[in-house]
């Protein structure tokens, strides 16, 4: 699966951004998720939309971020509201048969898109 992300950029604290990730190739039955990685930190789980089921979020973004999925377009979105400086990171889209909250559940990754949040 090839994953192409769009939508990163710079925003002031309290603002919003919407990321998108288009998948080409095998997508049936696979979870699609978002992770992020700040400088000097490990890649961390943000949100996942299973093929079937309900979305899951990390505690740090719950209530502020919303993941959605357009199955016809093989695209997953991440609406990010009330952004905080600590949300600043490179955001990665991922696809995997297992999915879940760990990086090991994903075997296809996008190139990453930078999200910058200024005070």
Image (cartoon, rainbow, N blue to C red):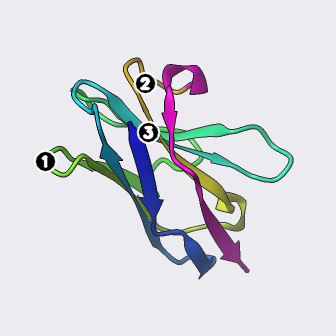
Which residue is labeled 1 in the image?
A: 72
Report helix, strand or loop for mark 1.
loop
Report the residue at 61% width, 78% height from top.
Answer: 10
> Mark 3: which secondary structure?
strand
Which region of the structure is painted magenta? 102-119
Q: Is residue 83 above or below residue 33?
A: below
Q: Which residue is mark 2?
A: 99
Residue 118, image x, y percentages: 71, 78
Q: Height in image: 70 above or below 81?
A: above
Q: Secondary structure at mark 2?
A: loop
Classify residue 32 by image quadrant.
Answer: top left
Instruction: Write the residue at 71% across / 59% down.
Output: 86
Q: CA distance from mark 1 to mark 3?
A: 17 Å
Marker disc for residue 4: none
Residue 97 picture location, percent across and down:
37, 20
Looking at the image, do the residues carrying marks 3 and 2 touch, with CB atoms under 8 Å apart? yes
Is 26 colored magenta in this rendering? no
Left or right placement of residue 16 versus residue 42 in this view: left
Which residue does the image show at 50% across and 26% down from the upper left? Answer: 107
- Nearer the viewer's eye, disc 1 or disc 2? 1
């Amino acid at each position: 699966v090839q994953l192409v992300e769009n939508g990163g950029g710079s925003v002031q604290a309290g603002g919003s951004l919407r990321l998108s990730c288009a998948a080409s190739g095998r997508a049936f039955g696979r979870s699609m998720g978002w992770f992020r990685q700040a400088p000097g930190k490990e890649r961390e789980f943000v949100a996942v939309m299973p093929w079937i089921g309900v979305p899951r979020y990390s505690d740090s973004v719950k209530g502020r971020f919303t993941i959605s999925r357009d199955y016809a377009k093989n695209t997953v979105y991440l609406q990010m509201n009330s952004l905080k400086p600590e949300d600043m990171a490179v955001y990665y889209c991922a696809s995997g048969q297992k999915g879940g909250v760990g990086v090991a559940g994903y075997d296809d990754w996008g190139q990453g898109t930078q999200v910058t949040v200024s005070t």
